[in-house]
Amino acid sequence: MTPRTRDTVTPDTPDEADALDTYRSMRDFTRTAEPAGAAPEPSDGPERRFVVQRHRARRLHYDVRFEIDGVLVSWAVPKGPTLDPAARRMAVHVEDHPLEYEAFEGVIPHGQYGGGDVIVWDRGTWRPYKTDDPAAEVRDGQLHAELSGERLRGKFLLVRRDDARSGKEQWLMFHKRDEHAVDGWDAEDHPTSVVSGRTNDEVAAAPDRLWRSGVPADRAEVETHPAVPDVAGPSDDELAALDDLGASGTWEVFGRRLRVTNLDKELFPGRDDEPPVTKRELLRYAARIAPVALPYLAGRPLNMHRFPQGAATRGFWHKQLPDHAPDWVPRWDRPDADPGESTTYLVVDEPAALVWAANFGALEWHAWTSRTSAPDLPTYALIDLDPGTSTAWEDVLLLARLHRDAFAHVGVQAFPKLTGRRGIQVWVPVTVGPSFDETRAWVERLSRTVGKVVPDLVSWRWEVRERGGQARLDYTQNAINKTLVAPYSPRAAAGAPVSAPITWDELDEPWLRPDAFTVRTVLERVAERGDPFRGALTGDQVLPPLR
């Protein structure tokens, strides 16, 4: 399916508002992946789009939709359209749909209006051949349409049978006798999608896959809910073997042999009265946290923030997987890399790969918010509450609570975590389909609404020096190859703090600090309380329009 998320723009005229109001009022866009649609705009040119969807709801029918004045004017045709000029098909005039609906293929959840599976059975262009104003023709009870589709071609006529003032209008649809007419032609002899080649049964059996048109076939089908890796942690013997190594050696862990070096190097300065954190302790942490962190890293390119000489020195970003990486290390070759860009990325698809990255000096782990299967499609919308130099921690908490209230108001599930430095980040899981432009626009609109409540705390300036010490609600991280630090990643600071997930209720706890948990304490928290971020892995949420 190809869901879209669009901000609903307040239209300029009542007529524009009416076009999709009925459609939107019948659907809960927090549950269905159907597009909410933008405000309609007039259609330009003589050729317009049409789509026919084979839709198995309570009863099988075909939805025939014509682009007219910025919406898809729609009829439900129980037996489907036909090229047979002798056949007459009943057609029920239903609510207008948004133009984005032409690409919708997937499963509408049961309990929602029209619940069932949908395929794109035909699509193409059409032109009105007896009028320049098809909207007026429809109002008068007729539509003369010449179709150029993959299955339907030639001249069709839709005629209203009655002038129903209430309920849904009954129409007839038939094909004119022209060079494209075929006697006995039946839509049910052609049960597959013209987009994916799948049948309704196949779509219903695999609703967690998305087919994208316009990209190469080997990248067109995308998993929207890939399996979450389930691995065991390191054994006591494996951890003891790490402790027994000298300054360097070979460590066998998770079935891999890793050459580890400089194990006694102090990578993180001590905090308070604690001793520094050594590389040996970092590798132990990486191995123990891997089963918890892996679901947030697997299948995603990793941007490594490296500090080979330790967190007290200047670090640098390392995206390109080095040539000396072992052959077993999972990787992804970026197909659209421009000259000078990184071409091969580490992908932490197995726990030993995370240990390898830590040994390579990656003190921080920043995975992409999209997967290698569809790098241009995010799986999260991101909010970064970035404090300024004058922003107190209580102000950060206030901004986080305001976002908590905003998410509750719009009915969206979102998951906060401490940055491990000074701020709080919020991840909003979304079903695969919306673009980065769309998630960025959605987050910007939400955060600007929150910012209006406390304008003295927030700056929208890009440059730090221009913000006057105020906080920034950073929506710009919603872009390809831009990342926020991964859950449970260490941060390059004294004491090895961790970007730890929290619950919304914990925003009110007096002990809460952005660096409250470290590599020495967060594992005990997970053992006692579990992982509060797990809900972010569901990935089936559709962002509602924001008015």
Image (cartoon, rainbow, N blue to C red):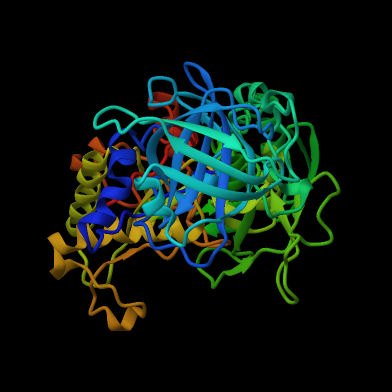
Q: With 274 as the anchor, is 192 left or right in this view?
A: right
Residue 462 placement (x, y as % from top left): 36, 77
| 429 or 157, nearer to the observer | 157
Residue at the location (46% across, 42% down)? Answer: 430
Is residue 487 shown above or below 452?
A: above
The N terminus, quarter of image: top right
The answer to whether residue 343 is above or below residue 71 is below
Is residue 371 positioned above or below 537 on the image?
below
In the image, taking residue 387 as reference, residue 494 lies left or right, namely right
Q: Quadrant of residue 82?
A: top right
Residue 516 visible in the current orientation: yes
Picture coordinates of residue 490, whole percent (x, y):
50, 51
Residue 209, x across and y down, in percent: 63, 34
Specify whether 462 is left or right of 215.
left
Splitting the image into 4 quarters, where does residue 512 fall? Answer: top left
Number of numbered discs: 0
Q: Is residue 132 left or right of residue 337?
A: left
Q: Residue at x 54, y 71 (%)?
A: 313
Q: Nearer the viewer, residue 481 or 137?
A: 137
Nearest the eye: 222 or 178: 178
- Can residue 368 be seen? no
Residue situated furthest bottom in the rendering: 466
Q: Position of residue 27 (x, y in %)?
A: 34, 34
Residue at the image point whose x is 54% and y is 73% from the top: 314
| On screen, residue 404 above or below 197 | below
